[in-house]
Amino acid sequence: MDGAHSAALQLQQLPPTSSASALSETSFSYKENLIGALLAIFGHLVVSIALNLQKYCHIRLAGSKDPRAYFKTKTWWLGLFLMLLGELGVFASYAFAPLSLIVPLSAVSVIASAIIGIIFIKEKWKPKDFLRRYVLSFVGCGLAVVGTYLLVTFAPNSHEKMTGENVTKHLVSWPFLLYMLVEIILFCLLLYFYKEKNANNIVVILLLVALLGSMTVVTVKAVAGMLVLSIQGNLQLDYPIFYVMFVCMVATAVYQAAFLSQASQMYDSSLIASVGYILSTTIAITAGAIFYLDFIGEDVLHICMFALGCLIAFLGVFLITRNRKKAIPFEPYISMDAMPDSYLHNRQLLFKRYSNSRNVPHHYLESL
């Protein structure tokens, strides 16, 4: 009887032990999510401050005769150091939290830039004018903060170790191979219309950026995760997949920057920021959900609240960037009254010299 009674007691004690273990694993996953989110928020904040410091330095030295005078200032070097520190924080965040959580947190940089721009504004304003002018920015910041809170709260809790075997397994899985086939076909079609048909629409260019960016973040998470495991003692640098992912990360980042540079030459930066954030975040989350299976095991409520957080963050970023001033293009001109006499005299000599020649086109003489 005593043996049977003690066995029954042991069986009764097993479920609490199992549930306690599951609770511990869940709390640990939330802890990793929090660490990754804090690293991403810190990184984006620091990068935003760094960019504004460097922009302030360039504006202050705009009239300098030396085009590289900013190299001699401590402010510019401080901005460079902060930028490297922020990018390191964002890079490390991918090793702790799911990709679907880290990518939307880039909205923090938009919020920070809006707040810094309002604080360091140089114009004089009245309180009524200030509220009327920046009401969209305040509403956008509020929505972006609410969306970010929902993203962090209802983010997926998938925390798979980024070992070489796991990364290779995901890379050759049929869902990701199918996704890659669709993405390559779409990218080639967009590139054809952009290069051959001169389709310079901002959506076309930023879709190219977003497709490249989705591969960038997928490879960044793999590289960051394998590096962190190697630092912890589980060496992953001897797997060939690490170097494949590293090369893909660098290549896609370089081409992504090239397309962004082309977009910035044709469109306003605020429009690029809002449309680019929406497209890049959507496609990157899709790529992460397919490659890393971020939402496997998540209930419908968490997925719906996470999607709601993304939509609110999208709306907040759109309102913030919509309220920014559009850059006025500079169109230089030279008045005929401001031209030197020697320039006019040379033009008259050229006209007399070529006016008697039959081989000179008529439109060339008119231009003189």
Image (tube, grey):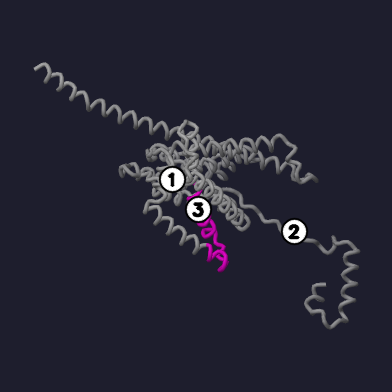
Question: Relative to residue 285, is residue 21 depicted above or below?
Answer: above
Tell me, yes or no, whether the highlighted magenta stretch contains residue 157: no
Q: Which amino acid type is marked by label 1? A: Ile
Image point 87% across, 75% down: which residue?
351
x and y, in percent, of residue 279 in the image: 48, 52
Work out whether mark 3 precedes mark 1 in sequence or the reverse, and give the earlier one: 3
Label 1 sits on residue? 312
Asked if the residue under mark 1 is in contact with the one under mark 2, i.e. CB atoms within 8 Å, the reply is: no
Say what secondary structure mark 2 lies in. Answer: loop
Q: Which residue is mark 2?
A: 332
Residue drawn at x 51%, y 53% is 212
Query: What residue type is disc 3 on?
Result: Ala
- Per the image, the residue denoted by label 3 is 210
Going by the numbered disc 2, the residue's amino acid type is Pro
Q: Is residue 29 above or below residue 6?
A: below
In the structure shown, which secondary structural element does the residue marked by tag 3 occupy? helix
Q: Is 205 in front, or is 145?
A: 205
User: Whole-Å distance between the Cαs marked 2 and 1?
Assistant: 42 Å
Residue range (magenta): 191-217
Residue 60 occupies quadrant: top right
Q: Quadrant of the C terminus?
A: bottom right
The quarter of the rendered structure image containing the N terminus is: top left
Q: Is residue 283 visible?
A: yes
Total labels: the figure holds 3
Residue 275 seen in the figure: no
